[in-house]
Amino acid sequence: MDGPESGVVPAVESTADDITAMRIRGAAAIADAAATALATQAERSTADSPAAFEQELRAAAATLYETRPTAVSLPNALRYVLRGMDGDTVAALRSSTIARAERFKRDLAQAQDRLGEIGSHRLQDGDTVMTHCHSTDALACVEAALEAGKDLEAIVKETRPRKQGHITARQLREWDVPVTLIADNAARRYLDRTDHVLVGADSIAADGSVINKIGTSGVAVNARERGVPVMVAAQTIKLHPDTMTGHTVEIEMRSESELLSDEERAAIIDDATGEVAEAGATEDSNQTQVTDSGLTVENPAFDVTPPRYVDAIVTERGQFPPESIVTLMRELFGEPTDDPWDG
Ligand SMILES: O=C(COP(=O)(O)O)[C@H](O)[C@H](O)COP(=O)(O)O
């Protein structure tokens, strides 16, 4: 149930919209925004009974959960905050939920700093890193290395179609790191000049597979061929507990419009058939289905890099070969998790 009758406050709906539209993006930022939204829900709730308050919080969590499917930091954040909701009165539930959300946000920031420090030890003075997409965890490693007095250079993959590489480039230039921005297709050529491929993650599966921005697996495979180590910076909030029991990570498919404008589509169909394209697109959701023109556009947002192409997963708890990440996952998450916003 959504809307006013569910008691979900407009600020939560607006955060959910921002995540869906990628105005808030990146796994860590999404988790942080989700925790903030639950705190806001708790603060502004007008529920008149503990049961109604809990129901509202679960509805708010469900609204946030439905936004994007791949970054496990989102459900991990929602579960963490909801599990801290404790008390026999609305006032007690409110304050425990807000305190829990604040703790989550504090821990998230601290974990990133700690991860950065650990990851920075892999980077030597004078190294060149190649980045893909924009990852705050990956950049934390660069920042810590710079703070330790190391000079680094960066080769920044543009990261089509959304060009998150520009965000990375801007941050690196703010830190005065020399940046070479390249088209994604040029990555293999530039691996000759690269000492580390450094990426983040949206989810890490129990077998050590890394789910990250589409194109990560390609650069990782090429890096292995060239002998360039691949380092994945991922706080433990990116570990996907459900994969311990065989659950697979859903890869988000995004809109055709990120790849192809209406004019470009018309030009392709015109060229191919000599006819003007029929209005065959139905845009009722993120995924555009085009059935009658013969042109299908697919836009997966993420891909899966098998563990054999990853040298190290750097977390705030230390560095791990991907194959051993399941041990940390068991320690942190224990038994398979439930979704408290379900039912
Ligand atoms: O793939 C992306 C972002 O994809 P999108 O732009 O589609 O959200 C990032 O590499 C991870 O989310 C890690 O980011 P962080 O380290 O900041 O959590």
Image: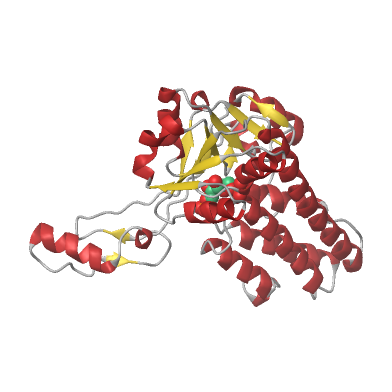
Number of numbered callouts drawn = 0
Furthest residue to the left? 274
> In the image, is residue 104 above or below residue 129?
below
In this view of the protein, can residue 78 be seen by the observer? yes
Quadrant showing the N terminus: bottom right
> In the image, is residue 313 above or below residue 72?
above
Quadrant showing the C terminus: bottom right
Q: Nearer the viewer, residue 27 or 121?
A: 121
Would you say 36 lies left or right of 325 here? Answer: right
Q: Which residue is drawn at the image coordinates 69% and 44% (left, top)?
A: 338
Question: How far from the left and from the top, in percent, is residue 228?
Answer: 48, 26
Question: How far from the left and from the top, in percent, is residue 98?
Answer: 83, 61
Q: Which residue is drawn at the image coordinates 42% and 64% (left, top)?
A: 285
> In the image, is residue 118 above or below residue 76?
above
Question: How far from the left and from the top, in percent, is residue 110?
Answer: 77, 46
Would you say 25 lies left or right of 320 here? Answer: left
Question: How far from the left and from the top, in percent, is residue 13?
Answer: 62, 70
In this view of the protein, can residue 72 be seen by the observer? no
**Quarter holding residue 327:** top right
Would you say 255 lies left or right of 59 here? Answer: left
Q: Nearer the viewer, residue 312 or 307?
A: 312
Q: Nearer the viewer, residue 307 or 110?
A: 110
**Quarter holding residue 170:** bottom right
For the rendered model, the colour scheme is: secondary structure
